[in-house]
Image (spheres, helix red, strand yellow):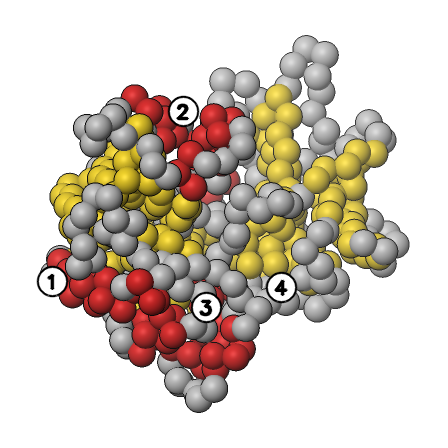
């Protein structure tokens, strides 16, 4: 593999819309050399004018390889001709370095309305694939480009909805009129570049993730496109969970920060938020809903979420202090319960947890607990045990996953953290996402002496996932820092 490789280019003129359109797209294979990078297609149409088309990250193959995709479309107008035939090169820039795939100095080219031109190193290639399943999508279209010289007998998609516990096989079809039937294009199948398009539609129903690989049977052998041994994968938009301590109205520029939190929830597309130190005016213990900080944040969202909240004690001598859950999806069941021995509203060690049962599309029922527990010497062991027992009782067969989120007042690696790890029931999701090797040492192989590996990890906020849950963490990020 080079630093950047062109996998295919598409040049199509379609009459499917009300106006004639020319669509150009380029799929690129990029070596992941740096987080900060720029990928472009530098191209020219028949007018001879050179342009730069930015490519955008498409999907990850592994730690070393990524797909990037560039797309652009033009509509024919009285004074707007189409680009026609196109010549191009692809460029990859990282800090201090630049790489090209320009066909050894000759530039690549593709004729107008010719369909797809595939790199010669890939006689079998999955093409035009998306990175995500959309809401409501139940059929997954598959298009496979095959070199005509292979004299193909059969093209098959091997796919699974359950991580290869069961496997389905779907045969692809070859149609001479593929481009015309699908796009009202004059491109031929196969075209003059020798590319045949075979296609299928997988009935994925409401699956969250689908994995697949493609086999091609010729007279002499069987070829595979298995995404460099990783299999292709496509899934719905991942579930995003945020935990945040609101500091009980003690922040400078407090109202501005509540607006900033609402803005971040929208920008980050967060689905479920566990809030702690939610404050509303004490009002002789009766509270004041209009001043509730979870309510204020919710009302400042572009579209308000479902909200459940409860309070546990007097905070900073003037607020009812509690916890809350905000959810994009309906909360079908909710409850609040003291997990502390004390239930005295005037004691800071009276701690209440809020639970919400949320039905997440394509995932199922989630039990989410928003928690703010006491320090180790002030009742954490007893409170965590009460929370653990409550969560276990709620985790029935119909529940896909249980999440304990919030401020646990235990530093990573401390006695409290060891208590959670030694329960053999919950895993630290942020650690799993950001330090997978250390996570395995602590929560899987249970190597001795791991506590000191977390000396520099000063987290007290966590998302703990119950073992056996039908969720898998893919990324973790710290927000609302001095730099973010």
| Dot 2 crowding, Cα within 10 Å, few <14, some 14–19, many 20+ | some
Q: Which quadrant: the N terminus?
A: bottom right
Q: Earlier in the sequence, mark 4 or mark 2?
A: 4
Q: Mark 2, mark 3: which one is toward the viewer?
A: 3
Identify the residue under disc 1.
393
Q: On screen, 393 above or below 343?
A: below
**Real-space Cα distance between discs 4 and 2?**
40 Å
**Residue at 72% across, 51% down:** 37
Q: Secondary structure at mark 2?
A: loop
User: Which of the pair 94/484 is nearer the observer?
Assistant: 484
Identify the residue under disc 2.
300
Residue 439 appears in view = yes
Q: Earlier in the sequence, mark 2 or mark 3?
A: 2
Q: Mark 4, mark 1: which one is toward the viewer?
A: 1
Identify the residue under disc 3.
412
Q: Secondary structure at mark 4?
A: strand
**Real-space Cα distance between discs 4 and 1?**
44 Å
| Dot 1 crowding, Cα within 10 Å, few <14, some 14–19, many 20+ | few
Identify the residue under disc 4.
65
Q: Earlier in the sequence, mark 1 or mark 2?
A: 2
**Real-space Cα distance between discs 1 and 2?**
35 Å
**Residue at 44% across, 89% down:** 448
Q: Mark 3, mark 1: which one is toward the viewer?
A: 3
Q: Position of residue 396 (x, y in %)?
A: 12, 61
Q: On screen, 103 above or below 74?
A: below
Q: Secondary structure at mark 3?
A: loop
Q: Earlier in the sequence, mark 4 or mark 1?
A: 4
**Residue at 38% across, 54% down:** 407
């Amino acid at each position: 593999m080079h630093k950047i490789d062109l996998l295919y280019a598409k040049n199509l003129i379609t009459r499917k819309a009300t106006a004639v359109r020319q669509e150009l797209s380029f799929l690129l294979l990029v070596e992941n050399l740096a987080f900060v990078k720029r990928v472009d297609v530098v191209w020219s149409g028949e007018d001879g004018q050179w342009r730069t088309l930015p490519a955008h990250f498409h999907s990850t193959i592994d730690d070393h390889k990524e797909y990037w995709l560039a797309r652009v479309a033009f509509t024919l107008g009285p004074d707007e001709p189409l680009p026609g035939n196109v010549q191009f090169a692809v460029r990859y820039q990282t800090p201090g370095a630049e790489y090209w795939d320009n066909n050894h100095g000759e530039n690549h080219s593709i004729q107008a309305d010719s369909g797809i031109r595939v790199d010669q190193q890939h006689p079998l290639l999955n093409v035009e694939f998306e990175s995500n399943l959309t809401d409501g999508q139940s059929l997954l279209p598959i298009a496979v480009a095959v070199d005509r010289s292979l004299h193909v007998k059969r093209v098959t998609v091997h796919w699974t909805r359950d991580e290869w516990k069961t496997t389905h096989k779907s045969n692809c079809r070859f149609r001479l009129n593929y481009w015309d039937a699908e796009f009202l294009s004059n491109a031929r199948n196969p075209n003059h570049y020798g590319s045949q398009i075979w296609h299928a539609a997988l009935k994925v129903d409401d699956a969250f993730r689908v994995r697949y690989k493609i086999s091609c049977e010729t007279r002499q052998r069987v070829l595979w496109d298995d995404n460099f041994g990783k299999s292709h994968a496509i899934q719905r938009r991942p579930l995003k969970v945020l935990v945040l301590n609101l500091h009980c109205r003690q922040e400078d520029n407090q109202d501005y920060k509540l607006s900033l939190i609402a803005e971040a929830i929208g920008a980050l597309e967060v689905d479920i938020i566990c809030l702690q130190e939610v404050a509303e005016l004490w009002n002789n213990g009766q509270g004041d809903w209009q001043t509730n900080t979870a309510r204020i944040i919710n009302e400042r969202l572009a579209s308000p979420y479902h909200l459940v909240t409860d309070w546990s004690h007097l905070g900073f001598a003037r607020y009812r202090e509690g916890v809350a859950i905000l959810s994009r999806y309906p909360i079908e069941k909710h409850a609040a319960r003291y997990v502390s021995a004390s239930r005295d509203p005037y004691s800071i060690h009276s701690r209440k947890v809020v639970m919400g049962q949320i039905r997440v599309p394509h995932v199922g029922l989630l039990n989410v607990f928003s928690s703010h527990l006491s320090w180790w010497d002030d009742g954490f062991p007893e409170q965590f045990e009460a929370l653990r027992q409550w969560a276990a009782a709620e985790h029935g067969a119909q529940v896909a996953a249980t999440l304990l989120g919030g401020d646990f007042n235990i530093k990573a690696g401390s006695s409290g953290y060891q208590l959670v790890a030694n329960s053999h029931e919950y895993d630290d999701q942020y650690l799993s996402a950001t330090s997978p090797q250390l996570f395995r040492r602590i929560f899987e192989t249970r190597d001795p002496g791991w506590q000191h590996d977390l000396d520099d990890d000063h987290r007290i906020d966590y998302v703990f996932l119950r073992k056996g849950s039908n969720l898998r963490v893919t990324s973790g990020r710290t927000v609302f820092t001095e730099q973010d």
